[in-house]
Image (cartoon, helix red, strand yellow):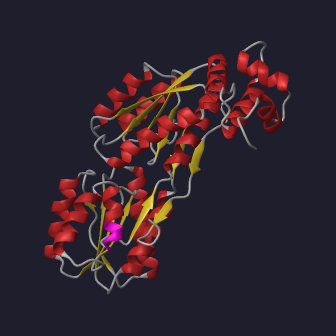
Amino acid sequence: MTGRPTIKDVARLAGVSVATVDRVVNGRHPVRTERAQKVFEAAESLGFYATGLIQSRISAKLPQHSIGVLLQQPKQQFYQNFAKGVVEASAKLSHLGLHVIVDFLPSQRHADVVEALRAMAQRVEAVAMVAIDHPIINEAVAELRQSGIPVFTLLSDFAINTREVYLGTNNLQAGRTSAWFVNRGAKQSGKIALCVGSHRFHGHELRESGFRSYFREHAPDMSLLETLVNLEDDAIMYDATFNLLKRHPDLTGLYIAGGGMEGAIAALREERQPGEVAMVCSELTTDTRLGLAQNIITAVLGTPLTALCESLLDIIHQTLTSKNRTHSGQVFLPFDIFLSENI
């Protein structure tokens, strides 16, 4: 196509009449949402001058639903990326009519989590959140369900009997895959250390279980140390890694199931030669990307944030607009694998 795209071009690509496009652009007569969305997608694809107007026409006719997203660790790059991803997904999927409010939990303490959850529930029709698995939190989720506000769990499951849907990666599989990389990357038999953010994170427990089961089956000669807890804090992880390296000169592998990996990277950079300890961690950030490039990290398993955020909004929309809620259970997305050769 040459020149400026016209209404006829939009109509042809959308598979509708010119009159339909005109009605959408000028708001002359009602057009079914499905058709209006086709017109918008065609206009956006062609760079049609009235694309923004078409989007506003569609959005104005949609019922608006407010949803809340509660995330951990506001200073961590991964959660900043997560928050950005949710906002971008809501803009991309504007035809769903969802208004998204993103906030961060002040801590992992169950009392703080419950307070933040109840406060968010006062403002929205559904909540999605990352949190530890604790009876007090689970009770709050059950209360919200009774009041008609569904809760969706992200990354690490909790309130399994009362939450709506879990969305994230298969954490057991992630743990076994991480063990595979540590085992392949280890230069020799020796000790393997692993670290979780909290034993209350169901996802971390599953990753630990998968990690240990792999070594029991495939590398029983490796000695797995007692699991460490770092509260997903870089400073705690730095000290823990430094102490591990001093106490266990034969340390040959390290797996970090949650956050705090930046501290481990710093300690390994100071105390060991690149590649001397096979390290696997989660999420691609500025620090883990550099760690891969410098051969300090063997592999990174990442959450597909774009796909996760879009799936989340789509499922929440279906839940809120359906008379009979049919969504329940778990939605697993394949995790990304990053190596030094594909970053």
Residue placed farthest to the top in the image?
A: 28
User: Whole-percent x and y of residue 176?
Assistant: 46, 68
Q: Is residue 293 magenta?
A: yes
Q: Magenta segment range? A: 291-295
Quarter in which the C terminus is drawn:
bottom left
**Residue at (84, 22) in percent of width and height:** 19
Q: Is residue 147 visible?
A: yes
User: Whole-percent x and y of residue 66?
Assistant: 51, 23
**Residue at (38, 75) in percent of width and height:** 182
**Residue at (30, 53) in percent of width and height:** 197
Q: Is residue 256 visible?
A: no
User: Whole-percent x and y of residue 82?
Assistant: 43, 43
100 w.r.t. 267: above or below: above
Q: Nearer the viewer, residue 343 or 74?
A: 343
Quarter in which the N terminus is drawn:
top right
Residue placed farthest to the front in the image?
A: 3
Q: Is residue 109 magenta?
A: no
Q: Quadrant of residue 72?
A: top left
User: Whole-percent x and y of residue 5?
Assistant: 73, 35
25 w.r.t. 40: above or below: above
Q: Quadrant of residue 24?
A: top right
**Residue at (33, 85) in percent of width and height:** 187
- In this picture, residue 181 sits left or right of residue 327: left
Q: Quadrant of residue 288?
A: bottom left
- In this picture, residue 51 sits left or right of residue 260: right
- In this picture, residue 222 sits left or right of residue 40: left
1 w.r.t. 235: above or below: above
